[in-house]
Image: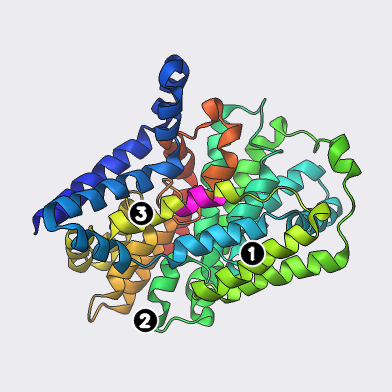
Amino acid sequence: MQTIQLVGAILFGLALLHTFAAKSFEILSHRHPRHAGLFHLLGEVEVVFGFWAFILIAAIALLSGGEAAIHYAESRQYTEPLFVFTVMVVAASRPVLDIMERLLLVLAKLLPMRVELALVWFGLALVPLTGSLITEPAAMTLAALMLAPLVFRDGMPEWLKYGALGVLFVNVSIGGTLTAYAAPPVLMVAGTWQWDSAFMATHFGWKAAIAVVINATAITFILRKHLRAPAAPSAEAAAAPKVPLTVTAIHLAFLAAVVLLGHHPVLFLGIFMLFLGFTQAYQRYQNPLIIKEGLLVGFFLAGLVVLGGMQQWWLQPIVESLPPVALFFSALGLTAITDNAALTYLGSLIQGISAQSQYMLVAGAVAGGGLTVIANAPNPAGVSLLRRGFQDESIGAIGLLAGALAPTVVAALAFLL
C-alpha cells in the first residue's frame, strides 16, 4: 500500500461522511445567513464528490508532483459522466416528456383505477423497466420528472416521499437488467463474461421485473390516500404551442442516437451539439433544458470516478476472497458505499471466477443500487431533479437508506430465490 492510496481511501471516506451530512449543511445555511452561500454549496450532494476529487488531485500533486496528478486525472475514464449528462438533458426535453406523458395518460385511462394512481404506478414500475431499452439514466430522468408533481410535492408526508424515492432508485437499478447494455454494473462485465441480452433476460430480467412490480404496487397502495388528481396546466403551459409530431420524432431520434452511441463520447457529444442547435432553432416548442442539473450530476459522477480509482487496493481482495453467497451480501453492502459499476468492474478482473460467483456479484450490486446516492450512477440524476420536493430542498442520506431498505430486501429475495 502506497501513501497516496491511503490518502485516497481517507478522502473517499470523508466524501462519504460529507454525503451523509449534506442535509446538515443545508440546515446551517438557514441558521447562518452570513455564510449561507458556502453552506448551501457544501450541502449540494452533487458537488460532494467533485469537491473531494479536487482535494485528491491536489494531494497527489503535493506528494508525487504535478505531472503525476495530471497523469492520474487524465487516466480516468469519464464516458459515463458525460453520457449521463447528455442523456439527462435530451430525455428531459419537452417533446420527449410530452409524448411519454400522453402515452402513459392514455394507458392510465384504460385501467380500472384513478388516473393519478395509475400514473404513479407507471412511473415506479413501467418507466424503470424501460430503462433496459433507453438506459437507466434516461429512465430515471423521465420517471423523476413524471413523479415530481404527483408524489414529490408539498402536502405529501416526508416519510412517504422517502419511501417512493427508495422504490424508484431500487427499481431503476434492477429494471435495467433485462438487457446487457442499459445498467452500468452489467456493462462492466458483459463483454468479459460474454453475457448477452438473452442471458440477462433469462437469468436476471424476469426476476427483476417481479421485484419491480411488487415494489411499485406496494408503495402505490400506501400512497393512494395522499394522491390527488394531476394539476391543470398553468396558463403559460396551456398557451404554449403544441409540439408537432415531426419535432417529437426528431427528439426521439436524438435520444435513440445518444443511447446507441453511449460508449463513444466523441460521437454522442457531437449528436448533443446538433440537438442543442435544433432546440435553439425550434425554441417555441421547448422548455428550458436542464443543463445545470445535468452538469451537476456529471460533476458528481466524475468526482466518483476520480476518487473510486484509488479504492481498488482494498476492494478487490474482498471481492476475490468471498464464496458466492457471502459475495452477494458483501456486494449488496459495499454498493452502498461505492458505485456498483466500480464493484462489478473489479469482479471482471478476477481470473477464474466461477459462474455462480459472477451471478452473485452482479445480483448483489444491482439489488443494492438504491441504498445511497452513490450506489448507482443514475441516482444523482434523481436527487438533482427531485430534491426541491423535500424539506430544506435536500435529500437526507438516512431517509433514503430507510426508504430503500424494504424494496432492496424484495430485490435481494427475487435474485436469491
> Is any atom of residue 210 visible in this view?
no
Any mark on residue 130, and which?
1
* C-alpha distance separating marks 1 and 3: 26 Å
Q: Residues within 10 Å of mark 1 (few under 14, many from 20)?
A: some
Which span is picked out in magenta?
294-298
Q: Which residue is mark 2?
A: 193
* C-alpha distance separating marks 2 and 3: 25 Å
State the residue at coordinates (64%, 74%).
Answer: 257
Q: Earlier in the sequence, mark 1 or mark 3?
A: 1
Tag 3: residue type?
A: Leu
Query: Contact, CB < 8 Å: mark 1 with mark 3?
Result: no
Q: How many marks do you count on the picture?
A: 3
In the rendered image, residue 180, in percent from the top left (x then y), is placed at: 50, 75
Q: Quadrant of residue 363?
A: bottom left
Q: Residues within 10 Å of mark 3 (few under 14, many from 20)?
A: many
On the rendered image, what quadrant is the N terminus found in? Answer: bottom left
State the residue at coordinates (36%, 52%).
Answer: 303
Q: Residues within 10 Å of mark 2 (few under 14, many from 20)?
A: few
Tag 1: residue type?
A: Thr
* Viewer-side residue, 175 vs 77: 77
Reply yes or no: does residue 297 show up in magenta.
Answer: yes
Q: Quadrant of residue 416?
A: bottom left
Q: Which residue is mark 3?
A: 304
* Viewer-side residue, 186 vs 167: 186
In the image, 184: left or right of 221?
left
Q: Secondary structure at mark 2?
A: helix
State the residue at coordinates (39%, 34%).
Answer: 42
Q: Earlier in the sequence, mark 2 or mark 3?
A: 2
* Viewer-side residue, 19 vs 177: 19
Q: Which label lies toward us, 1 or 3?
A: 3
